[in-house]
Image (cartoon, helix red, strand yellow):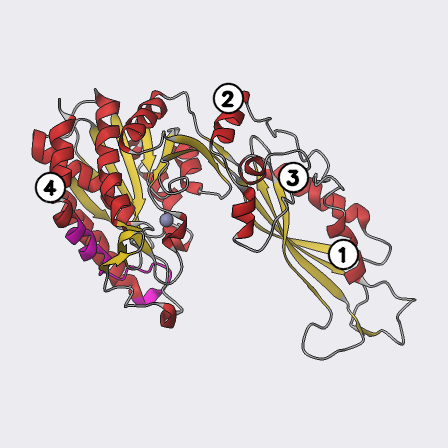
Amino acid sequence: MTLDPVLARIDADLPQATDRLLDLLRIPSISTDPAYQGDCGTAADWLVADLQSIGFEASKRATPGHPMVVAHTGGDGPHILFYGHYDVQPVDPLELWDRDPFDPQIEDTAKGKVIRGRGSSDDKGQLMTFVEACRAWKAEHGQLPANITIFFEGEEESGSPSLTPFMEENREELTADIALICDTGLYGDSTPAIITQLRGLLGEELTITGPNKDLHSGMYGGLAMNPARVLARVIAALHDENGRITVPDFYDGVPELSNELAAAWDDLKFDHKDFLGEVGLSVPAGEVGRRPLEMIWSRPTCEVNGMWSGYTGDGFKTVLPSEASAKISFRLVGTQDPLKIRENFRKMVQDMLPADCTVSFSDHGASAAGQMTTTHPAFDQARKALSDEWPNTAAYVGSGGSIPIAGHFKDILDMDAMLIGFGKDDDQIHSPNEKYDLSSFHKGIRSWARILDAMTS
Ligand SMILES: [Zn+2]
């Protein structure tokens, strides 16, 4: 049995593994703030040295922004690429932290020990779970069971400007049989989750213009067209009374949930009352007749993210505004075509405008949804391996958010990706007092050892 001694070593080595993570967490690698540029390089150097100590051929690779870290073992077996990011979010507001975000500590809490510090959960603690699994395997067996490539990015929290050019320039080096991405969470507290679908995103901003300047509503009101009224009518028309989105052909490419997935999701016993109750709500507001989990994972959405017009300051002003604007985003699923939807949305708005009104649009990005290839054997192997480690069987889940990296692996490298992570909902990533449960770290390391074993034996 090749796995048991690896797991035993992981257990014995946990204090040292934790110390190594604390070391990495002390480096303030905030990618979006130029003041921390040197620290991003330091974090990359730290990872290169650590990977070299395990026997990886590792290097820091320059980009126009922060460096990438790429490491290889070479060797036999399936070629597996592992992705994580070493950069972190800014720490503001600093006064809401109970301790220095870059002086990480192990804390005892009512729910067990946690590693407290910026980047502990997103994503340094998560990326180190895989590194530690490799370290234990190498120490026990002298070599890793697969041909492993590690790919760490330093700009994930600042829009990944160098990512796709780097992937294009290093296509051959980065293409593997499958990509493992560790930047997501468990389902609940103890159900490991493999993400099978991610929603895409389309962002649109529109400004409707009526009169050529702001007018006095006493002098012009009643006679002049008010663009705020027009905008309100447009926004109100985007959904029908059943919560369906009315943009023409919007549902082209939206798949029905398979019976298998529907049953699996029902097994998760998602409690929308709890979920909504946390934010002071109670009633699902999506399409009538859909499961709450469908509403956040597998159905497309249209949301108003901002709207403004006229006078919004203190007091009152009887203005009849010249302009009215809104920011509107669509979450997309299946094979919905973001560019086609943009075109149809713009035409729909245009067609609703009364005489004397014009509209201008600006675009805030468009990305299609991602569907993972769950028939790839790695999915079944990982699911069994995770179920052996955790109290609950691993679940296939959707993600309402958009994680572009998975799509880039598919589009640029024609490589399937599997997203597995061990974060928890209360990890406070991107917020003050970020933490990672010590048990997530420990079981995460053990999980990767089990997955490597399942994928290679
Ligand atoms: Zn992340």
Q: For mark 1, what is the residue?
A: 232
The extreme front residue here reads: 110
Percent coordinates x, y for residue 243 in the rendering: 70, 41
Q: Mark 1 or 3 closer to N-term?
A: 1
Q: Amino acid at mark 1?
A: Ala
Above or below: residue 302 compared with residue 380? below
Q: What is the spatial separation of the Cα atoms under label 2 and label 4, in whole angstroms?
A: 40 Å
Q: Amino acid at mark 3?
A: Ile
Question: Which dot, 1 or 3, sits closer to the camera?
Answer: 1
At numbered mark 3, what does the secondary structure look like: helix, strand or loop? helix
Neighbourhood count class around disc 3 (C-alpha, 10 Å): few under 14, some 14–19, many 20 upward:
many
Label annotation for residue 317: none
Location of the N terminus by quadrant is top left
Q: Amino acid at mark 4?
A: Ala
Q: For mark 3, what is the residue?
A: 341
Q: Residue at x 43, y 25 (%)?
A: 373
Question: Which dot, 2 or 3, sits closer to the camera?
Answer: 2
Numbered range of the magenta stretch: 18-35
Residue 28 on the magenta segment: yes
Residue 145 visible in the current orientation: yes
Evaluate if marks 2 and 1 touch, with contact meaning CB atoms under 8 Å apart.
Answer: no
- Examine the image and state in which quarter residue 92 appears: bottom left
Q: Mark 2 or 4 closer to N-term?
A: 4
Label annotation for residue 260: 2
Question: Which dot, 2 or 1, sits closer to the camera?
Answer: 2
Position of 34 with respect to 400 (left or right) is left
The extreme bottom residue here reads: 315
Q: As rendered, which of 252 and 293 lies closer to the eye?
A: 293
Q: Mark 4 or 1 closer to N-term?
A: 4
Position of 353 with respect to 436 (left or right) is right
Neighbourhood count class around disc 1 (C-alpha, 10 Å): few under 14, some 14–19, many 20 upward:
some
Q: As rendered, which of 361 and 455 lies closer to the eye?
A: 455
